[in-house]
């Protein structure tokens, strides 16, 4: 069997965060199960382009990847439009990522014309927040003209029950399979352990002697991630613990300047730090050496970084706008309402509660390790 994965961006385009880790992770796992994987993508990486060979296949860990060169970044690639038909024609199954992108339009039309089996992973594109956030009318027109006519020919992959509800709300007759994203559990084990003070200095260039707890958060700096809520909440928490620190990692997606102004207005420059985009190795160091992970997203269809934090055995403070509603039941952290008072109270609670890092790791390994997830996905491929 041969699968063609179509994605507007692909590893190592880490600017886009979790979805890149997910598509790269599942691609490698599918190959390890004896299925040929060919990826058709672009060289986009946020507002920049990857420094990588384009318009021909490159083999990485058994996965064949073709990065089509974009003439207008995130908007247009002539070579993709001319080449994707041939890529799809050679495949048995076409696995399409995202929804509101020109790569989706052309790959979907060609796949239907060639009568290919189609699996579409919308990656949160149909959430209420996403549909109402930007270009609302254009998105509704896009869905009506380019997605609805083909919706019954698609197997939709939802990464959570929340996303399944979003898909069914828009397309009631859609075939939807809930398969969450996975995590490469083993890659987050045995990371270098350093003192909190040394880690804080490494990523902020500031030395402190009296450091109580490091709270870590990560994601692209966009409104949907709720970092403004997190910063407001942390400023309240500092009234109880002035020795605590909050580190936020992630590339700017139009929200950094607002967050910087917020930090200045609240006068928490010595307590809250935006450290920018980090590498995978740095992410492992941060997740393994922080005390707690926290995320105040206004919406997450899944949240890869949540699974990664749990893989490091870290207790989590998480927005209840995410699908991780069993977090408290499994003694992995605290769910908070998406407002500053609720998150501030959760910060206070979590430092006084006891968590077993071994049990947290066991939970995520049993439910979200790629070796578990890929088996469910392959059943759909072969059904």
Image (cartoon, rainbow, N blue to C red):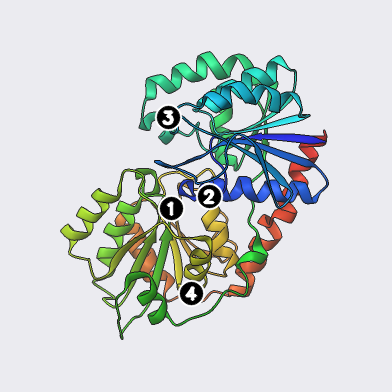
**211 displayed left or right of 358:** left
In the rendered image, which quarter contains the N terminus?
top right
Residue drawn where x is 33% and y is 70% of the image: 204
Q: Earlier in the sequence, mark 1 or mark 2?
A: 2
Q: Is residue 56 visible?
A: yes
Q: Quadrant of residue 58?
A: top right
Q: Is residue 172 visible?
A: no
Residues at circles 1 and 2 in contact by the CB criterion of under 8 Å: yes
Residue 305, horizontal then vertical, whole percent: 52, 56
Q: CA distance from mark 1 to mark 3?
A: 25 Å
Which mark identifies residue 72?
A: 3
Q: Which residue is mark 4?
A: 289
Q: Which residue is mark 2?
A: 18
Q: CA distance from mark 1 to mark 2?
A: 8 Å
Residue drawn where x is 60% and y is 65% of the image: 311
Residue drawn where x is 39% and y is 41% of the image: 47
Indicate the secondary structure of the residue bearing disc 4. helix
Residue 59, horizontal then vertical, whole percent: 69, 46
- The foreground one among 340 and 302 is 302
Residue 64 vs 289, above or below: the answer is: above
Residue drawn where x is 39% and y is 51% of the image: 251
Q: CA distance from mark 3 to mark 4?
A: 40 Å
Residues at circles 3 and 2 in contact by the CB criterion of under 8 Å: no
- The foreground one among 334 and 36 is 36
Residue 122, horizontal then vertical, whole percent: 56, 33
Residues at circles 4 and 1 in contact by the CB criterion of under 8 Å: no
Which mark identifies residue 219?
A: 1
Residues at circles 3 and 4 in contact by the CB criterion of under 8 Å: no
Q: Indicate which label's residue lies in the foreground, 1 or 3.
A: 3
Indicate the secondary structure of the residue bearing disc 1. loop
């Amino acid at each position: 069997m041969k699968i063609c994965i179509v994605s507007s961006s692909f590893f190592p385009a880490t600017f886009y965060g979790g979805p890149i880790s997910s598509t790269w992770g599942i691609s490698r796992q599918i190959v390890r199960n004896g299925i040929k994987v060919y990826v058709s993508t672009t060289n986009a990486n946020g507002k920049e382009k990857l420094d990588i060979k384009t318009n021909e296949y490159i083999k990485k860990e058994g996965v064949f990847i073709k990065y089509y060169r974009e003439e207008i970044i995130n908007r247009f690639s002539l070579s993709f439009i001319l080449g994707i038909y041939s890529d799809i024609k050679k495949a048995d199954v076409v696995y399409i990522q995202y929804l509101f992108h020109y790569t989706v339009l052309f790959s979907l039309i060609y796949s239907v014309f060639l009568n290919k089996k189609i699996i579409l992973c919308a990656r949160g594109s149909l959430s209420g927040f996403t549909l109402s956030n930007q270009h609302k009318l254009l998105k509704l027109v896009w869905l009506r003209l380019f997605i609805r006519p083909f919706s019954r020919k698609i197997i939709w992959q939802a990464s959570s029950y929340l996303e399944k509800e979003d898909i069914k709300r828009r397309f009631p007759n859609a075939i939807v399979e809930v398969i969450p994203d996975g995590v490469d559990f083993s890659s987050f084990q045995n990371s270098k352990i350093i003192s909190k003070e040394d880690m804080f200095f490494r990523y902020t260039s500031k030395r402190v002697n009296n450091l109580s707890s490091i709270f870590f958060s990560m994601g692209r700096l966009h409104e949907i991630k709720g970092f403004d809520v997190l910063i407001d909440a942390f400023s309240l928490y500092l009234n109880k613990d002035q020795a605590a620190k909050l580190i936020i990692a992630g590339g700017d997606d139009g929200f950094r300047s607002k967050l910087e102004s917020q930090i200045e207005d609240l006068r928490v420059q010595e307590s809250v730090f935006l450290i920018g985009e980090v590498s995978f190795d740095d992410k492992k160091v941060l997740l393994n050496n922080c005390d707690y992970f926290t995320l105040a997203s206004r919406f997450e269809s899944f949240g890869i970084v949540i699974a990664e934090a749990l893989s490091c055995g870290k207790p989590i403070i998480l927005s209840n706008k995410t699908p991780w509603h069993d977090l408290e039941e499994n003694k992995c952290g605290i769910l908070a309402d998406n407002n500053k008072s609720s998150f501030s109270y959760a910060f206070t609670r979590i430092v006084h509660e006891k968590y077993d890092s071994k049990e947290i790791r066991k939970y995520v390994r049993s439910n979200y390790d790629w070796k578990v997830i890929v088996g469910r996905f392959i059943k759909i491929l072969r059904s």
